[in-house]
Amino acid sequence: MHDLIIKNATLIDGSGAEAVSADVVADRGTITEVTAAGGSPAKAKRVIDAQGDLLTPGFVDIHTHYDGQVCWDKQVTPSCWHGVTSIVMGNCGVGFAPVRPGTEGELIELMESVEDIPGTALHDGIPWGWESFSEYLDRIDTPYAVDVGAQAPHVAIRHYVMGERCYDDATPEDMAEMRSITRGALEAGALGFTTSRFYGHIDKAGNLVPGTRASGEEMRTIGSAFAGLGFGAMEFVSDRLNDPEELAWIEHITRTTGCTVTPLVAPGLGPVLGPVWKLAEKLNAEGFKLRPQVGARPASILMTLEGTINPMRQFPAYREIHGRPLAERKARLKDPDFRERVLREPPILPRNPDAVRFMNDHERIYILDAALTYEPGPEDSVAAVARAQGVSPVEVMMDCLADGVPLLVLFGIYEGDLEGQRRVIEHPQSVFGLSDGGAHCGVLVDASVPTYMLSYFSRDRQRGPRLPLPFVVHKLTQDAAQVYGLNDRGLVGPGYKADFNLIDYDALQLQPPKMVYDLPAGGKRLVQKADGYRMTIKAGQPTFENGEATGTLPGRLIRGAQSAPVSTLN
């Protein structure tokens, strides 16, 4: 009597191979047999007839920020709603360990500033009580609906070591201590180390977060913590990937430690323009692992009346009603007298030049279409629609916001389609990431990108070539898992984890994003669900059926690299 049999599935196994008709057997959380459809044993505690629907491995999301949320949300929403069965958090250098007692609030403020997670929710929802990274892992080592992996964050480590000096240059002694803490975190089970070297990550006082301008010597010293371990990854976001000095320490760490280095590739740094891609091609050809990390689309934000960035807040008339109920604000945006006043009074522009651009560059503010393609043409811009209607762009924005239609800003290089994004996703050295699950709660909900990649990029796209479905599944599963040495998942084969998605592929689609107030202390976040997931299975146990949680929590904390099944090594 087996634990689980899934029969008559259209299997895409995660390797990149084409679909086959198959039966899959699982016992004690592990796949034990994969046969041609009709060839499985007859008996199991549960038999699921796939009826020809798509069966994939569970998705692996390597770029999330659930470091606080895992303390109160054991389902790890919204990632679990989109077929994700393994997440890696602690990205971009921010996190909550190590922490000196009494300074917890300072780490919350840094996370709130960088990742747009309500500080009140973090204060209310995190139990604290740890100091070291090892103690943090022990505290979050609980059951989940997904497997959870953590990384050691540079910002927290620097803050722990240097205190009030954490914004200054590190001394050799500081660097040595940061290396020691990083090594200890890796030995305790951290999957990697992360940092931020990006101009846009600033704290509430307007300072670049600690470590942003850390020297190459500091990076090489901390990176040496990976030497001899044989596993782990270094993730970071940088706006200096064209700088030879930046590339020098990246190459040094990649060559001397054996770890995987995965820099987030900023908009515009494509295979042709970006030296980091050429370095990746050279190093990977020599057997090293430099994997530039790319997302489903260029960096973006959604502007809404409830969101963090609301373009109406720059208008004095709207400021007077900002605290009113949402329905009332929507009604006022339709009121002719109110609209006339908005158009007449000069706006009060924010101090941040990026925010000014996001809210006022009407040629690059787009109306999010009902199909949620995130691939607008020039005709979809607020400015173009205003010209066609013979009205002001501000009037078009008021109409959209009053109707609950988000306004989309794609920053960086966006030339009217996602062809540039498609090319970097297809690049042999790229790895798929950047969902930011758990973060940027008021401006985006990219935790839904696995569904987006399957439904739009592999099926519905009209503005350019689609990506092959087996390729998309591979990027979402085995390819992502291997970056962090999670070699026991991402493939449907004997010995691998019994993590699956059973999907009605034709019916798969995203639901519109919506704001909910379900975080601790009533904190808000944008969420997005999906239709078409018949079942998500973690370690052989269904966690979601037809979009509804079953209540089972078979997921666990991942500590360190995970070995591939022995049978696959022969």
Image: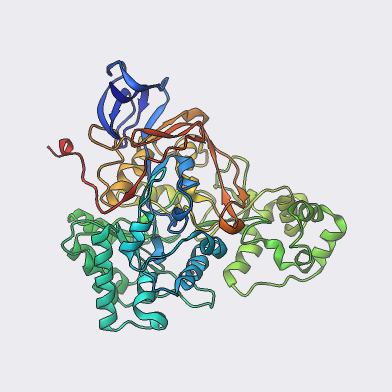
Figure colour scheme: rainbow
Specify the farthest residue to the right: 337
Q: Is residue 299 left or right of residue 194?
A: right
The location of residue 476, given as percent across then percent down, is 37, 43
The image quarter containing residue 215 is: bottom left
Point 49% across, 69% down: residue: 200
The image quarter containing residue 333 is: bottom right
Point 38% across, 61% down: residue: 273
Tell which of 24 and 141 is nearer to you: 141
Image quarter hosting the N terminus = top left
Q: Is residue 46 above or below residue 240?
A: above
The location of residue 69, given as percent across then percent down, is 47, 55
Residue 387 visible within the image: no
Q: Is residue 113 above or below residue 437?
A: below
Tell which of 221 and 288 is nearer to you: 221
**Count of marks, rendered view:** 0
The location of residue 350, given as percent across then percent down, is 65, 72
Image quarter hosting the C terminus = top left
Q: Is residue 224 left or right of residue 528?
A: left
Q: Is residue 324 above or below residue 213?
A: above
Residue 85 visible within the image: yes
Point 54% across, 74% down: residue: 204
Point 65% across, 63% down: residue: 359
The location of residue 410, given as percent across then percent down, is 55, 56
Tell which of 172 and 476 is nearer to you: 172
Q: Is residue 56 left or right of residue 549?
A: left
Specify the farthest residue to the front: 129
Q: Is residue 549 above or below residue 304?
A: above
Specify the farthest residue to the left: 570
